[in-house]
Image (tube, rainbow, N blue to C red):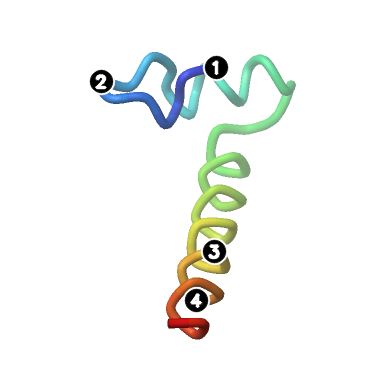
Amino acid sequence: MGYYEVPREATATEVAAELDLDASTVVEHLQRAERNLMAHHLDGA
């Protein structure tokens, strides 16, 4: 949906509406995924 585009093309609220989820749930899951990706990437460096 363009959440990670610059400039951002969709907000977390819009993503949440598309997925029929609460915006806070979407933000929480994205933050967790980003944290895990960064930890994995940095651990392998």
Mark 4–mark 1 Cα distance, whole angstroms, equals: 25 Å
Vertical placement of residue 8 versus 43, above or below = above
Residue marked by disc 2: 7
Mark 4–mark 2 Cα distance, whole angstroms, equals: 25 Å
> Which mark is drawn over residue 42?
none
Viewer-proximal residue among 42 and 23:
42
- Residue 4 placed where, x, y %? 42, 31
Tell me if label 4 and label 2 are in contact, CB under 8 Å.
no
Residue shown at 49% from the left, 55% from the top:
31
* First in residue order: circle 4 vs circle 1: 1
In what element is the residue under mark 1?
loop
Residue marked by disc 1: 1
Mark 1–mark 2 Cα distance, whole angstroms, equals: 12 Å
Label 1: few (<14), some (14–19) or many (≥20) C-alpha neighbours in 10 Å: few
Residue marked by disc 3: 37
In what element is the residue under mark 2?
loop
Q: Amino acid at mark 3?
A: Leu
The C terminus is located in which quarter? bottom left
* First in residue order: circle 1 vs circle 2: 1
Q: Amino acid at mark 1?
A: Met
Q: Amino acid at mark 4?
A: Ala
Vertical placement of residue 38 versus 34, above or below = below
Residue shown at 49% from the left, 85% from the top:
43
The N terminus is located in which quarter? top right
Label 2: few (<14), some (14–19) or many (≥20) C-alpha neighbours in 10 Å: few
- Residue 36 placed where, x, y %? 57, 68
